[in-house]
Amino acid sequence: MQASLSLSVSNPAAIPRSSHGFESSIPFPSKPVNLRFCGLRREALGFSSASTYPLSTSRSSRSVARSNKVSASLGSANGSSSAPKSFDYDLIIIGAGVGGHGAALHAVEKGLKTAIVEGDVVGGTCVNRGCVPSKALLAVSGRMRELQNEHHLKALGLQVSAAGYDRQGVADHANNLAMKIRGNLTNSMKALGVDILTGFGAVLGPQKVKVGKDTVVTAKDIIIATGSVPFVPKGIEVDGKTVITSDHALKLEFVPDWIAIVGSGYIGLEFSDVYTALGSEVTFVEALDQLMPGFDPEIGKLAQRVLINPRKIDYHTGVFATKITPAKDGKPVTIELIDAKTKEPKETLEVDAALIATGRAPFTNGLGLENINVATQRGFIPVDERMRVIDSNGDLVPHLFCIGDANGKMMLAHAASAQGISVVEQLTGRDHVLNHLSIPAACFTHPEISMVGLTEPQAREKAELEGFEVAVAKTSFKANTKALAENEGEGLAKLIYRPDNGEILGVHIFGLHAADLIHEASNAIALGTRIQDLKLAVHAHPTLSEVLDELFKSAKVNAHVGRSPVAEPVAV
Amino acid sequence: MASASSSLLTKMPTPSNTTISFSASLSPALPLFPSQFYLRRHRRTGNALRVQSKIREIFMPALSSTMTEGKIVSWIKSEGDLLSKGESVVVVESDKADMDVETFYDGILAAIVVPEGESAPVGAPIGLLAETEDEIAEAKAKAASAGGSAPAPAAATPAVSPSPPVPAPAASAPPPPLPADGPRKTVATPFAKKLAKQHKVDISKVVGTGPFGRVTPGDIEAAAGIVPTKPKVAAPAVAAQPAPIAAAAPPKAASAPSTPALPGSTVVPFTTMQAAVSKNMLESLSVPSFRVGYPIATDALDALYEKVKPKGVTMTALLAKAAAMALAQHPVVNASCKDGRSFTYNDNINIAVAVAINGGLITPVLQDADKLDLYLLSQKWKELVEKARAKQLQPNEYNSGTFTLSNLGMFGVDRFDAILPPGQGAIMAVGASKPTVVADKDGFFSVKNKMLVNVTADHRIVYGADLAAFLKTFSKIIENPESLTM
């Protein structure tokens, strides 16, 4: 589940963050206010000088935010590592992935002296082994698909002779993109004055971090953002050549004739798109009874009809791969399957390669969590809704936060970044709880899938519990002018909402540019905008965004519900 | 899925009594009932045995209140697939969106009546659901008989024998003997399996040629007798070496039928004569030929023809004589290139004339056409045509030509070009003579009859100037035809 869901880091170096210094000096209310946060990046409103950022101007106001629970847990730390009195930094972030980067940039904007610790390469999974290089491969596969679809081209009046590709060229494109984004990320942090400390980071004690072998750095607050690694179930032997994880697959060292993909989530689905476009045949192995678990069932069904059935893909569902042996001694890769329920052996597949896309495991080993009495749960670091780390006694660890894949709340790059920003908001005097239901997710197949909020079954379950009504509205891309002009009418947008008050519970899109279309819905959820207000919003014609326009307009909100007071008069 | 259908196919059906035919009664009006099949159960009671047939018709559902007909976007299941209650079977396009349609019943999809991409009115049967394997045959027969009204069950029943019906063409044989070396597992790639299903190929009978003996898509296509339509899948090798593939394609296309026969077409093998024509035409592809056309006024020739016609002279004889006389002045056009290295000049001028006979084509030869007079030539031609009709031509009477004449003018064809026969240097294609407005050098307009002749020649020996000179001579002879009678 990594990060095929990507936050596109578009040259952040060029966008200096505005420093809203005044915000942090506003007296903080002791009662937590759920300020919904929307938008991960803001355009610059002013320049903040990189070298002369103000040293935290507002530390005094922050202490109010701490709850009483904190002092209790302080005592449990062992005596030798008592909290230091003065600090090298206001904030240290362990892990320079997208989550750490987002937090660091926001911290600087808020005037915190910030350092980021990285033991590997800046950018983390997303930039180096996840969303970024996979988008490069998917860009290639999308074009290959267009060029190979004779029927489609003919309908547009185009003639193209046989399309081909150069594997190394494709691989280089992915690698170059990762390098470029990594450079951008590094430069943006350097330019803003974030200290990048190279070395493996570990928590030594409260407010103390060890970097590398023997450097000890102190900070007022610490954010753990160490991310995740591909999860490989036991019995599977990864050799990095014929049995691979997404880490290897993104290097595209070879394109097998036939590859089995274990797991049909985002990662598996995106790779099936890449491999089939490049000429491979694909066999999915899925433990659950349905392909694409986790998607709204209706969207999943349609996606299967478009992304799986017509392609050179077959699948085995309801089976576990118990043993996967890499190709050697002239034998192919073998995959032993057992029935997921009865555990009886089912069959053995023989393929040219196997990609393990069974999800991701948190990367939290060696972090020194035992020093602060924190026990991981299946590797994940337990946190509360404000990303504050919880120790084995169920108490909050003061000044320690964990964001991103390492806490397992929502394993998406942009979710990590949003969590980091939320933490910095708290540290600088504004309580903030991130609404995870407003975080969109996308799968960059051709066409794309995107979603935000609840699926229909989840919404119905919630409605049952809380006693409200749920309604569903749907629109097809077939009725959209722009989609038809592109000859890409295959697609569906689905809105799950409360007819009693117009609240959006979830939006799911499958179709052309779905990943870009979801944000109107996710922003509406984040801001609490109701459907009755959205219905009055104007969309340019002809654009794909009219799919959502039509979707909102087709929703039936009860007549007595007026427009919400959010709308303010605007000068025209 | 494959195993399910194959095990089912190997079992012979028990055709209990297939005599009673079903009439597919269309329901007049259907209530709105989206996403579900309309299945009607036919119960047969006519026979003493009281065999109950459990074949249900799958109807086009009404997916919206305004829908009058629906288009089948895709069949999610194929014929022979087991269906269980609640499973999606077919995708139907309504006015706004595509809807998956589910089945209410367990059973086997016995026949698809309305194939993908076609439309059917709401309530019309689009497929048949059998409850047991035994009823598949019956359902298929039914689907075939319903075929008259329904669009095309062609794909469903390519080779239905009237009695006893077989479940599928591939299953007419007894169960396949397992390979002798024990239970060898057949490994087939995903696309190969899809193709096998599509073309109804039994994978277990296909010998895999892929890595580790696996069955590849190519193996299935070969087994189904299909030349791959798209050899250019996105494999990198294709990009690297497009030339060999392009070069390899034509012979392949020549040696095997390039496309699968369309349903309803009949295959008639070549007669010996047609086979010979086919062979000669293919041989011509190795000759670098070119064409030169020439318009010729025929008023004088026409006048002459009117004069000599009562004496039994035919237009063919006139043209053959004229060509022969022109060839006498241009021996290179009468030559041939046998080995690609030399000219072979022919002593005789033998004019072969293409004649269509009973679906065939033959070229009787007027030997020494330059030496014989018009009347003898005409007489000779009459004999040759009679012999050709009686199939009594001797080999030297049809294969000794040094130059060929093909005339389609009598059909009103105004111009065409001919394919050079093997062993000859040139062939002349003669079009119809038509009244044409011409301006002379003084600017006076007049109407003259003109015909277009087009000569195809072997450019290894006959060059453009040779042909132009020959045509100029030929046109002079035609325009001043008195010499023909001498």
Image (spheres, rainbow, N blue to C red):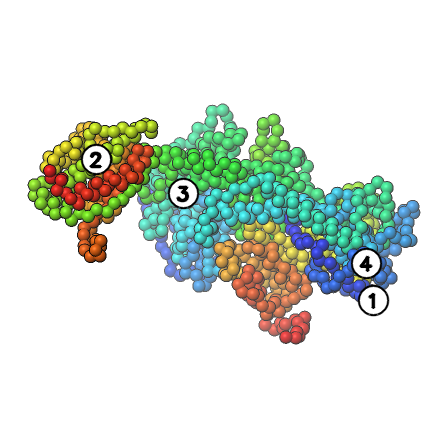
Residue A454 visible in the displayed image: no
Q: Amino acid at mark 1?
A: Pro
Please say if the residues under marks 2 and 1 sit with CB atoms less than 8 Å apart: no
What SS does tag 3 mark? helix
Chain designation of label 1: A
What SS does tag 2 mark? helix
C-alpha distance separating marks 3 and 4: 80 Å
Chain designation of label 2: B
> In which quadrant is the C terminus of chain A drawn?
bottom right
Q: Amino acid at mark 2?
A: Gln
Q: Which residue is located at x 56 percent, y 40 percent?
A: A166
The label number, if any, that marks residue B329 in the structure image: 2
Q: Nearer the viewer, residue A550 or A289?
A: A550
Q: Quadrant for residue B381, please give it.
A: top left
The label number, if any, that marks residue B93 in the structure image: none
The label number, if any, that marks residue A53 in the structure image: 4
Please say if the residues under marks 3 and 2 sit with CB atoms less than 8 Å apart: no
Chain designation of label 4: A
C-alpha distance separating marks 4 and 2: 103 Å
Q: Is residue B88 left or right of residue B462?
A: right
Residue A251 coordinates in the image, percent (x, y): 64, 40
C-alpha distance separating marks 1 and 4: 22 Å
What SS does tag 1 mark? loop
Identify residue for label 3: B136
Residue A307 coordinates in the image, percent (x, y): 54, 48
Q: Which residue is located at x 59 percent, y 61 percent?
A: A495
